[in-house]
Image (spheres, rainbow, N blue to C red):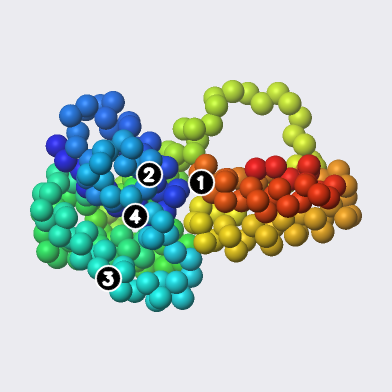
Amino acid sequence: MTIYFVAGEVSADNHGAALMRCLRELDSELQFVGRGGPQMREVAGEQFKNWIADAAVLGLWEVLRKYGYFREQFHETLREIRESKPDAVVLIDYPGFNLRLARTLRRQAPRQKIIYYISPQVWAWDRGRIKRMAHFIDLVLCIFPFEVDLYNQVGLRALFVGHPMIERLPDRKIETQRDPNLIGLFPGSRSREVRKIVPIMLETARELRKHNRNLRFEVAAASKQLAREMKPAVDALDQSQDGEAIQI
């Protein structure tokens, strides 16, 4: 059995790789093809395309600037699906690309099984899309329980599979008291996004510490690569008293 995956962001690469590993535990003969990031490629093999660095964009301007690239990749993805003849196509988040891909794929290959994992949050920004999605998606794997009813109401089959981040957290009871002086900073999972947001977050942290020197901050990195990219900005604070209070 062959499954074609499409993931376009670091977080989707993380979750896609975890899904691949789980599927391989059920069937070691499964073949994975498609496009995603380094973690998915490590599981799938050399034939899997790593396009995350180019695919992860932030804002309308970056999308327009790379329109030619995305148009080329869109048609290349359709061609790869036609040639590989997968038993199923699994789309992970990345709605700007994946929803259009699913709609076109349904028109070109009506019998193709299309599964959406980590569905777009259309319930927050465009509920009208939920009904339209039922025409070109066969199954939605939801990470929030309330999403299931929203999709089922329009005839779109949906299953709650749990949030992938919960699977990665240790299953233990927290006995230590929560630290009211600890603040988490979450700059995102796209490299360009992180480069723009981290300096603003760090400057905000410094301003907050002017009013409360007990505050500490921990910056969440979506990958080891992003942690390395953020480290110089954090290290630059080491010359001040704020450096020790901010960790990645």
Which quadrant is the N terminus positioned in? top left
What's the mark number on residue 38?
2
Which of disc 4 and disc 1 is earlier in sequence?
4
Sequence-first tag of 3 and 1: 3
The three-letter amino acid code for the residue at tag 3 is: Arg
Residue 99 image point, x, y percent: 30, 62
Displayed quadrant of residue 74: bottom left
181 sits left or right of 148 in the view:
right
At label 4, counting other C-alpha atoms closer than 10 Å, the crowd grade (few under 14, some 14-19, many 20 or more) is: some
Q: Secondary structure at mark 3?
A: helix
**Mark 2, residues whose alpha carbon is within 10 Å: few (<14), some, or many (≥20)?**
many
Residue depicted at 16% across the width and 41% down the height: 2
Task: Check disc 3 and report the residue beneath it.
Answer: 71
Query: Quick one: label 2 or label 3, which is nearer the N terminus?
Result: 2
Q: Which residue is mark 4?
A: 51
Which label lies toward us, 3 or 1? Answer: 1
Q: Nearer the viewer, residue 202 or 155?
A: 202
| Rendering quarter of residue 202 | bottom right
* Residue under the image location 15 percent in, 60 percent down: 79
**Kind of residue indicated by mark 4:** Trp
